[in-house]
Amino acid sequence: MSSWFDTRPWLSTWGDIAPKPYTLDSSTPLADLAATVDAYGDEEAITYYGYHLTWAEFDRYSTAFASYLESQGIDPGDKIGIYDQNTPAFVLATYGIWKAGGVVVPLNPMYRDELRHIFSDSAVKGLVVSKAAFFSRAAPYAADLPVVVLSDDRSFQIDGPDAIFSMFDQLPGEPGVSGPVEAASATVLPDFQAVIEEHLDKDFAPASPSVDDIALIAYTSGTSGKAKGAAAAHSALSSNSRYVTRGPDFEPGDGFVSLAPLFHITGFVCQFLAAVAGGARLILNCRFEPGSLLDLSAREKPTYMVGPATVYTAMMAHPDFRQDHVASFKKLMSGGAPLPEGLVDKFEDKVGVYVGQGYGLTETCAQAVTVPHGLRAPVDPESGNLSCGLPQPDTMVRILNDHGEPVGPNEIGEVAISGPQVVSEYINNRQATQEQIPDGELRTGDVGYMNEGGWLFIVDRKKDMINASGFKVWPREVEDVLYTHPAIQEAAVVGIPDEYRGEDVSAFVTLQPGAEVTPEEIVDHCRQRLASYKTPHLVKVIDELPKTSSGKILRRTIRADALEAARAAR
């Protein structure tokens, strides 16, 4: 059945700046690397606190690691986990696994008990793991794996700040490394760099996976039930990574800061794979910390960065933040979480740089919708929502009602996405695949609408909707108003059960450094801009909002804490 979306109204808004061709030719990350090596082999590929690799060296080292994997019995299709931060070992291991015909399973370094499910569900046969994380986290689940390789991030360091690495050793709740590797294994586990050096001159022919072969199994955040393994084909990763570098603002050799963690789909595709596909210089930032990122930006002069809204907030709040820290940037993007208009305005007023944004999910291999460079996201005059962008020219986005039927412009419904970047399935979960990716179209679970120009507006997650006295309240709309208050740094809105209203709108905020404001003043600020049923009845100022490792604010944690406090107060 045809619908308004079939006209792809966003193409007219893109105009002449739309990347062409609209349907990208199929490729693979390995083919993209080969093209980059042919064109820019002697150019710098990676920099990591003084450690440097050219594209030719990157290619050679990743091939050596593939040779090692083959020598250890790793076959095409085998899954290999990577449990590390943004390090050279992560990027070299990724392409080495693909050259061995394997499938990459990136693992969040903050995972603990979650590893049990992921190791079992994906049936990983090998693991590349940081020494700092191995002992207390991965060892119980990796003991029976045929291949475990330890990476020592310090051995890549030449002139980097020691604070970065001592910070990495002391992950929240974790002691530093305090015992020998033999404590976790009957034999000494191989070192990542050592096996590369051993296999540099081995006779090895890299695999050539097809565009339809599975390249990546990325696990969802698991907000409801156990995390699901989204299976992405080589062509899906290649398509989306090449999209990043197809605009007029990109030139080979541009510096891409790995701000978002590489184990997260945004960092993996929009920074790491995009740099490889376009021949950009990948500036690895081990782990986000505002001060070190500012120093890195001033030293390396990057041109592109993408990260969640919370990162830009943290940068502005740092006492050493100056405009010259971002003077080299040509493009700043936000992804992984909604970008409030108030934050965009504050950042632009302070440093003169406009932060664009994109929208996507693990299941779309990151971005599916973006604010094109050179355009500004419109703000809906009625809701105050900031658009997350235009669908990519080769992507179809539809808004569906509760019956799965497409609606018209400016009508609210569930966002559905189809295109070359959408994953094929959730492994070992046929029911979830059928329900959430019917006929290859992803049902995102996000509620939104599209205006006549094809600009997409995300209202909120279905499950986060607040029912206050029978009225629908979307937390995102209230949060956007809170961010316009000059004293507020971050905000999260949740619904708390209430006997009279059903749910009560409650806001939790942090303040800008040195700012002072009362909860009553914040409520009054909202009352002047929102309907009465949307105005928070409770505003609580807290020191810090809980977040995921990728920077998303954890509403569910805030909701649980608030509910527990409310019960205790009865």
Image (cartoon, grey):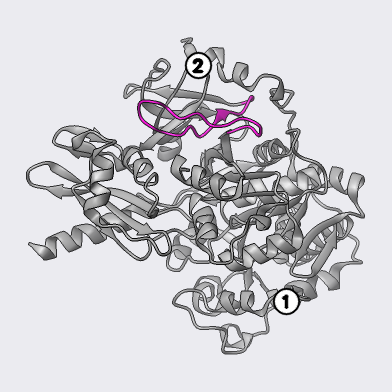
Secondary structure found at label 2: helix
Q: Quadrant of the C terminus?
A: bottom left
- Estimate the x, y position of residue 210 in percent, counting from the top left: 74, 39
Q: Is residue 29 above or below residue 158?
A: above
Magenta span contains residue 127: no
Q: CA distance from mark 2 to mark 1?
A: 53 Å
Q: Which residue is mark 1?
A: 191
Q: Quadrant location of residue 205?
A: bottom right
Residue 392 painted magenta: yes
Residue 127 visible in the displayed image: no
Q: Main secondary structure of the magenta part?
A: loop
Numbered range of the magenta stretch = 371-394
Q: Which label was assigned to residue 133?
A: none
Q: Is residue 195 left or right of residue 524?
A: right
Q: Find the residue positioned furthest to the bottom.
A: 179
Task: Single out the mark in the foreground, 2 or 1.
Answer: 2
Location of residue 256 with respect to 379 vertically, above or below: below
- Residue 108 falls left or right of residue 86: left
| Percent coordinates x, y for residue 315 in the rendering | 55, 59
Q: For residue 5, which numbered disc appears in the image?
A: 2
Do the residues under discs 2 and 1 have CB atoms within 8 angstroms? no
In the image, is residue 511 above or below residue 355? below
